[in-house]
Amino acid sequence: MGRLALIARLVARDLRHRPAEAVILLLAITAAATTLTLGLVLHGITTGPYERTRTATVAPDIVASVAPANNANQPADLANLTPLAKAPGVIGSSGPYPVRGMTLRTGDYTVPAMAEGRGQAPSAIDRPLLTAGTWARPGSVVLERSFAAALGVKTGQTIFLNDRGFRISGIAVSAALPPYPALCNVGCDFVSPNLPSGQPGLVWMTKTDLLAGATPADPVSWYMNLRLANPASAGTYATAYDNAHTAWSAPYLVSWQRVEVATSRVTESAEGVLLLGSALLALLAIASVAVLAGGRMAGQVRRVGLLKAVGATPGLVAVVLLAEHLLVAAAAACLGLALGWLAAPLVASPGAGLLGSADVSVSLTDAGVVVAVALVVALLATVAPAIRGARASTVRALDDAARTPKRRPVVTRVSRRMPPVLLLGLRIAARRPRRSLLGMASVTVTVAGLVTVLMAHAKFDARAAGSGALTNPVNTEVIHMTTVITVALVLLAAVNALLITWATVLDARRSSALSRALGATAAQVSAGLAVAQMLPALTGAIVGTPLGFLLYAALKHQGGMTYPPVWWLACVVLGTPLVVGALTVIPSRAASRTEVASVLQSGAA
Amino acid sequence: MRTYLDQPEDQGVNSLLSARTLCKRYGRGDALVRAVDDVDLDVETGETVAIMGPSGCGKSTLLHLLGGLDRPDSGEIKLAGKRVDQLGERGLARLRRDAVGFVFQSFHLMDELTAVENVELPALLAGRSPRAARKRALELLSRTGLADRAKFLPSALSGGQRQRVAVARALANEPLIVLADEPTGNLDSAATLEVLRLFDDLHEAGQTLVIVTHDSRIAATADRMITMRDGAFVDETRLTGGTAGSLSRLAGLEG
């Protein structure tokens, strides 16, 4: 108990003495924990809204359809579809309804649409729920809500379907098929073969209006909604049927479970972005904590010596530092969980295609994962400096002797031929290769994130430049999230650059003072310290760029790679070391203003 | 490249180094410490001056002021007839690079550099060619008796050898004056003798030296011994024998 009390007292005192470092640690780990929480809570957020929408719209357990042959020379065989209403296990049905692929045109967009022909009375199964306006009558249509939102249209406006004008009489939601932009995840398979390319949305109109434009060259498909005695078996029922009936003319069955999965893909990309972002932020947090822990150990050499001199074991010294960082990490995890939970409703929208808001809840498993990741981040970053501190010789520690820097003969040889600023910069960077590596890794992660956003923007711009293409709300959301995460990455990387510079400045105090005593100017020493940060930053930017391409490739699900203009990438690669150099100006200049005499008098060789 | 020696020179000055009414204070009010208090000093070319005194009497501060490592609060310092107390940061850097060589009690060698790499560093910082810097460094190591230790890291050298490397480094840019701050303070008797022999050689070669020490045996080897107390000079003795030929007679230092 006494030992625990001692550790607690040492930890509390140290945290009180260094509040700024504790806050930076807390913020770095909190950023990663918050993003991870958001990524985790996004998983499954559409389940509740989908079930609510399914109940409210009396959604079918299975949608069965028949389509014309691919070359459209044989019409859909309705005779194969209708007997399904009396198939074993089926207890109810609605339809058959005709369905056609059409081209929808508004003032701004020309996009594909899947139009369903309905009666004017509500059907027994699959009753789209109007959220605005009235049901379709001759000459008017109802648009699926997320499709209408993406088009930016409202009731009362006119749209053109295959060049024929229709008034929008209503906006509705339905759970029979996935909403825009996920409709094609299952729905495109059973419409006629002449659906224009692109992401279609759902439109309901009267059966008469739909059939009016149908020709042998532009035929209709048919579908029916089925209710099963056991809705839970819809998945196996549909799979078994589809496997047993493979002829093109046979009905194609889609279960409500497949529709639910397709619907959940609306948030899948955002979930992927957040999880990847949290991984990148966690890597940066490791770098932050490692630099702080290393710097703190370097600054605490004498304290460690004193502790050991009065009888503390090496284990106690390591435990105090570990306990301190683990405590901050646990606090950061709790803060991250709370922030993630609070921010989740802002990013966790199930989309306009479903009813109600997302069910945001942090499960015990989610909380466990976040806390574990935060603790692992702190542990990974602290364990090496803690062990090093514990192993330090007590006598050397009491003398406050600096750790002997690494000798790099190649760097020394190469730098001899360089101007004084580069000579100093290269040698400072080489003195602590692990710290330089941390700086490089920090920049690599940030640049990779930045390049991913640039690629997403390049793709977005390329699409926006296309004629009448409709903005995909999922892509827009992904770009927004990636941008927010990248801003967090850049901020954390900037903090890292400052921390690394500060640690380098403290570590290089004696060698900087000595260089000045030997004739280097303060400006040369200051520039050398900046160069020591800029060289790893340049390497990190060069490595991070192709990593960004790979990250983007891992994130996107379809479509080719669109690379940003070369000058964008050149700005990132060349601008990053310049930004890092600018960030290091203040600590570097502060260091170069220190009195040489006082540093040399206090330092021992 | 512009060097310290390119600056205009005051006329009619005989001393290589001179200081007039030099003052340096720390703190305020009751805590005011006069580290250097109204000091006048002249050092002739080729002369070895020892400054003695107890710890904290201001010897090292005076040396730092003379070498441009620190700035005086008042007074003036001239080196080779040129005012150095009014130089800006760049000018002081040039002074330290071209005209002054420092030897510290704690050696202050770069731990990660070999002996020869340490010695050539001032020449590289002065922008000299790597080849010329290395040639000069090897010559100096040879002169200090460390030619066979050129590739050794400081950690592999004895205290006396480290200090000899530091002396070689101080001579890298052929300075007008070498300022040594307790050069034997961290050394045993044998190593002290090694370093003193080196200073003896430098004195013989005409190198101007100012050595701060609290060891009277070291001071006895100089041309002139000045005693400091509470920041001021309290005594000055011209020694007839000087360093030349006197080392072997110093009791307690024989190897």
Image (tube, coloured by chain):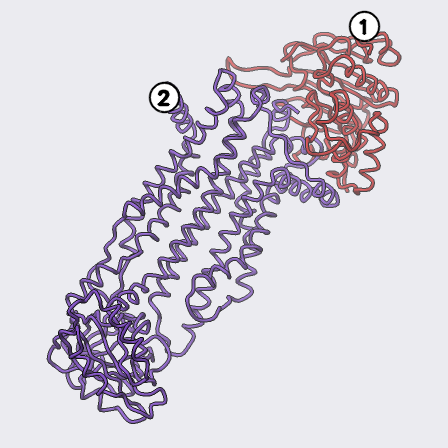
- Quadrant where the C terminus of chain A sits is top right
Q: Residue at x 73, y 24 (%)?
A: B103
Image-based side of A110 in relation to A380, left or right: left
- In the figure, the red chain has which letter? B
Figure quadrant of residue B12: top right
Looking at the picture, which amino acid does disc 1 mark?
Ala
Q: Chain ID for label 2?
A: A
On the question of residue B87 being in view, the answer is no
Up-down relation of residue A9 to residue B235 (above or below) = below
**Circle 2 sits on which residue?**
A5
Judged from the image, the secondary structure of the residue bearing numbered disc 2 is helix
Q: Chain ID for label 1?
A: B
Q: Residue at x 71, y 26 (%)?
A: B67
Up-down relation of residue B5 to residue A494 (above or below) = above
Report the Cα–Cα distance between label 1 and label 2.
58 Å
Looking at the picture, which amino acid does disc 2 mark?
Ala
Q: Position of residue A243 (x, y in %)?
A: 31, 75
On the question of residue A197 being in view, the answer is yes
Judged from the image, the secondary structure of the residue bearing numbered disc 1 is loop
**Circle 1 sits on which residue?**
B251
Q: Position of residue B127 (x, y in %)?
A: 75, 41
Q: Which tint was used for chain A?
A: purple
Figure quadrant of residue A238: bottom left
Up-down relation of residue A394 to residue A54 (above or below) = above
